[in-house]
Image (cartoon, grey):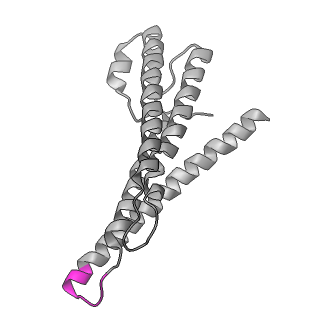
Amino acid sequence: MILGTLGALDRAVAAACKYGAIACLLGLFVLLAAAIVLRLVPLFTIAGYDEIVELLFIWLVMLTSLALWREGSLYRVVLLEELLPRSGRRVLEVAINLVMFGFALILAVYGYEFMTMSGETTPFLRLDKGWWYAAIPGCAALMALYSLAWLWRVVRRGEALETTATLIG
């Protein structure tokens, strides 16, 4: 029951990362293409262009980072892992996940402070910039949870994880 719920949540995070990143990248592509065309044929201007680009870019970076973190492939040097014996791989995996967990916690805490202290309203859209910066603490908190889950799997199973593994499978 609990593993089924965790698996469903994991799949939902994976889908949100995948489709959110695709939407952000597509939005950036459309805006860039429109900006190029509008420089050649200046029919109108795109109001709030910089604001929208900034929003899409920060969410794209954080969602793709979370997707790679979720898969356990963001910080991985496979060559080094292959040189170590199985017990050494396990120690390396634990050490890497502890460092990643610490980094994610620091990013979540300072990202939250940055988000709450921004206090800026965008000139055109008249939205609080906190919505832009919410990607940082939100994704970082999920990264910390994934680091704990990976750490739990390594310690519980007693072996290093495969480089192509996923959190639940």
Q: Could one spot residue 144 in this view of the protein? A: yes
Residue 53 horizontal side relative to residue 151, left or right: left
Q: Is residue 154 magenta?
A: no
Q: Is 127 positioned to the left or the right of 40 in the image?
A: right
In this view, 41 is above or below 83: below
The answer to which image quadrant residue 166 occupies is top right
Relative to 35, does residue 44 appear above or below in the rendering? below
Q: Position of residue 151 (x, y in %)?
A: 54, 22
Q: Give whichever of 128, 91 is nearer the camera.
A: 128
Q: Where does the magenta region start and end?
A: 37-45
User: In the figure, residue 32 lies in which quadrant?
Assistant: bottom left
Residue 5 or residue 140, whichever sits in front: 140
Location of the N terminus by quadrant is: top right
Left or right of 129? Residue 169 is: right
**Magenta span includes 39:** yes
Q: Is residue 63 visible?
A: no
Task: Determine the residue positioned at 52% across, 29% down.
Answer: 147
- Taking the spot 47% from the left edge, 8% from the top edge, the residue there is 87
**Residue 109 point in image, percent of width and height:** 47, 36
User: Is residue 124 positioned above or below 146 on the image?
Assistant: below
**Residue at 43%, 32% in the rendered image:** 106
Labels in figure, total: 0
Q: Quadrant of the C terminus?
A: top right
Q: Nearer the viewer, residue 53 or 123?
A: 123
